[in-house]
Image (cartoon, helix red, strand yellow):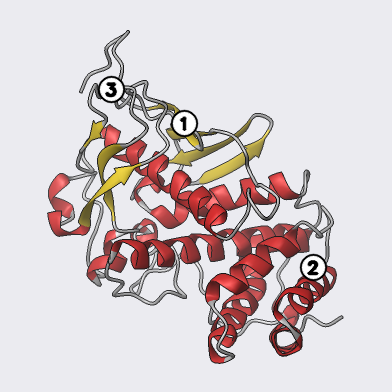
Amino acid sequence: MAAAAGLVGGGSSTGTASVFKVNPVQSSGNQSLTDQNDSATAVPTSEYARVQLRNLDGSGYLHGKWATVESSTGTPAYSTTNTFVYNRHQDQFEQVMGYFWVNQAQEYLQSLGFGSTLRGIVKQPFPVKIDQYGGDNSYQTDKPYRVRLGKGGVDDAEDAEVIVHEYGHAVHASQVPGFGGSEEAGSIGEAWGDYFGVTVGLAADQQYGWPRKAKAACPMDWDSTSYTDAPHCIRRFDLNLTVKDKTGEVHHDGQIWSQALWQIRLGYQKLGLSTRAWDTSLVQSQFSYAPDTSFAAAAKATYTTVQKRDGAAAARLVKDRFAARGITF
């Protein structure tokens, strides 16, 4: 599948690829998996899934309507038949993961109505750079508008929740340019990225019939294997932190907000409402956040949106779950 100038991937918008089922720790439940220097044998073949790649531009490269792999370590993935089947030892596998999961995240937003009945978000082929950052970190930038996925330990593009987390920052930037202008806004951004990674992964599990054998409130299990004890999580939604536990560090403090989001999700189910209804109202509310919002102001905006969309009982739930984290308005 070496790059070949002038060839076209059949002009088709669909292809076939191999990806992880979100990540192999979640799908297998095996907390003992380790990177082993990108070894192909470190992850059983059972944890890969054969999937359809959608919205390709027909060029034969991983370029499409909602995602484009802009650059990467190694030869760019290319196929005259839009067949992109690799294992994790090959650089192209992470390129496929980046394309598939950014497209999957955008498709999830669109399934909630964003881009049709509701305002569109990130309405462009979103650039993804794979293994172009030497540290074990990833980040999203506004200028230029793109995501860089780093390497080190488990390379970040091997874990769908890392990819979707970073795309979550692009969602906020699309909704509210300059979002993250205060410590609490930055914390909300990190929390939303974690929550978005989990909710898109859960939706994919349901869509494709994939197993989930690790706690959902524990994101980025595979990526974090090299620097956390089992059960592996980069952060958690169940630590019962409140605003009294704030440290001023956005990733830590984001766990206050993300637990509220998670508990509201669970509460919606108890009310007989769907998690998709909660996700829709949550995303819609984010259009109303100020770039430098406080926890209290963003919680109030969320409450107001839920009251309009989902009714009084759901609004009370939102207010109560934020209050449990010390966020009142």
Q: Amino acid at mark 1?
A: Thr
| Labels 1 and 3: the sequence-earlier one | 3
Mark 1 nearby-residue class (10 Å; few <14, some 14–19, many ≥20): many
Depth check: give the residue in front, 252 or 292. Answer: 292
Q: Amino acid at mark 3?
A: Gly
Q: Nearer the viewer, mark 2 or mark 3?
A: 3
Depth check: give the residue in front, 93 or 153. Answer: 93
Q: What residue is at 33 percent from the left and 38 percent from the top?
A: 96
From the viewer's perspective, is residue 289 above or below residue 302? above
- Tag 1 residue: 68
Q: Quadrant of the C terminus?
A: bottom right
**Mark 1 to mark 2: distance in Å?**
32 Å
Check disc 2 and report its element: helix, strand or loop.
helix
Depth check: give the residue in front, 154 or 113. Answer: 113
- Tag 2 residue: 298
Q: What residue is at 32 percent from the left and 23 percent from the top?
A: 60
Residue 266 visible? The answer is: yes
Task: Give left or right: position of 146 versus 308.
Answer: left
Residue 136 visible? The answer is: no
Q: Amino acid at mark 2?
A: Ala
From the viewer's perspective, is residue 290 above or below residue 60? below
| Labels 1 and 2: the sequence-earlier one | 1
